[in-house]
């Protein structure tokens, strides 16, 4: 029998937030084995009120991670399998005729859950992909002239297959820019993969709720109160300017990317129990927040390699002066 979710104070302090985050990461690590850094970044993304893009080959645990994130926070969860014939109404919902009173009523789609897994998002055509844009940016869905608010907290976790696999469509730039982070899980180390084989029946163990939706909202609230100094803000602006003026980049970081980076840095500070952002917090989340949002000139010429943007960002970190 699962344990009840632990009650949390109405207003968390950074030290309590750190303890809760570490406990939750420990719970997730029993299911998503050997991916401690990725679990930390995924939790940082949720606490920063962001959306997460998981890009990898099939079978590396992307769906398991999304389901476990929902379970550990007790979130309402829906999985949508994106395919070439999926329609926007299959995601958002539609007006349905009710014969009893000869009227139409709105039937909510799976997007009206607190955590939505958009599985294999890039297998759907752009029209269906774009159905997520308003929900991800504004937390609402507009249909037939009416706006329908989504529940809080609300996050989209999307999985994406590499573009060289059959039946994939590239995500539009506007879609990519709405994901706060992009992560890759990769294959586990051989000794950890052996542990998976020794599980009874080969199945992953269940994960109990260690918090609840109000707990996640509390973490998000305390992250929003983490202080940012003028020096840190100027540092982020210098990094953004360096991407926009880099000779190898066709497109640098957007304003949304700048705001997202700061939100992620605030959430990252909670892992150290701090109520202020340091340059290290910014650098820790820089690549996962920006590598998918900038575009190199070589990508425009068809010679893009997945890690190229990450390497460019590493160079910029070395070149841009950092506050002490």
Image: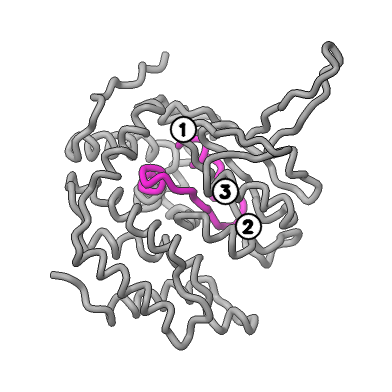
Picture residue at 39% right of the left edge, 26% below the top: 212
Q: Look at the image and tell me whether residue 78 can be seen.
A: no
Picture residue at 49% right of the left edge, 48% below the top: 51
Residue mark closest to the camera, 2 vs 1? 1
Look at mark 2 in the image and give the residue it sits on: 161
Residue mark closest to the camera, 2 vs 3? 3
Alpha carbons under labels 2 and 3: distance apart:
10 Å
Vertical arrangement, residue 5 with respect to residue 268, above or below: above
Q: Position of residue 139 (x, y in %)?
A: 53, 41
Q: Residue furthest left?
A: 324
Q: Position of residue 176 (x, y in %)?
A: 56, 60
Alpha carbons under labels 3 and 1: distance apart:
18 Å
Look at mark 3 in the image and give the residue it sits on: 158
Question: In the image, which residues are magenta?
Answer: 43-70
Left/right of residue 177 with respect to residue 89 in the rendered view: left
Look at mark 1 in the image and give the residue it sits on: 152
Vertical arrangement, residue 151 with respect to residue 142, above or below: above
Upstream in sequence: badge 3 or badge 1: 1
Tell me the SS state at disc 1.
loop
Q: Position of residue 196 (x, y in %)?
A: 48, 41
Figure disc tally? 3
Tell me the SS state at disc 2.
loop
Picture residue at 67% right of the left edge, 52% below the top: 129
């Amino acid at each position: 029998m699962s344990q009840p979710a632990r009650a949390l104070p109405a207003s968390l302090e950074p030290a309590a937030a750190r303890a809760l985050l570490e406990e939750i990461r420990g719970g997730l690590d029993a299911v998503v084995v050997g991916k401690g850094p990725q679990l930390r970044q995924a939790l940082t993304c949720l606490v920063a009120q962001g959306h997460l893009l998981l890009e990898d080959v099939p079978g590396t645990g992307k769906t398991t991670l999304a389901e476990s994130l929902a379970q550990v926070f007790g979130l309402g969860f829906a999985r949508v399998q994106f395919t070439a014939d999926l329609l926007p109404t299959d995601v958002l919902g539609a007006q349905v005729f009710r014969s009893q009173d000869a009227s139409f009523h709105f039937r909510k789609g799976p997007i009206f859950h607190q955590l939505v897994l958009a599985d294999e998002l890039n297998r759907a055509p752009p029209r269906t992909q774009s159905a997520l844009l308003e929900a991800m940016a504004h937390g609402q869905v507009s249909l037939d002239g009416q706006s329908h608010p989504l529940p809080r907290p609300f996050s989209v976790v999307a999985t994406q297959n590499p573009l060289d696999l059959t039946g994939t469509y590239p995500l539009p730039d506007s879609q990519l820019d709405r994901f706060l982070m992009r992560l890759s899980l990769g294959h586990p180390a051989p000794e950890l993969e052996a542990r998976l084989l020794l599980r009874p029946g080969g199945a992953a163990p269940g994960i109990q709720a260690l918090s609840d939706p109000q707990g996640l909202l509390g973490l998000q609230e305390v992250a929003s109160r983490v202080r940012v100094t003028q020096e840190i803000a100027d540092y982020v602006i210098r990094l953004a300017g360096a991407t926009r003026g880099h000779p190898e980049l066709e497109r640098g970081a957007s304003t949304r990317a700048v705001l997202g980076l700061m939100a992620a840095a605030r959430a990252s500070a909670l892992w150290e129990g701090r109520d202020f952002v340091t340059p290290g917090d910014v650098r820790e989340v820089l690549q996962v927040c920006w590598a998918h949002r900038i575009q190199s000139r070589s990508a425009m010429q068809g010679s893009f390699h997945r890690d190229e943007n990450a390497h460019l960002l590493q160079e910029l970190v070395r070149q841009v002066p950092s506050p002490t």
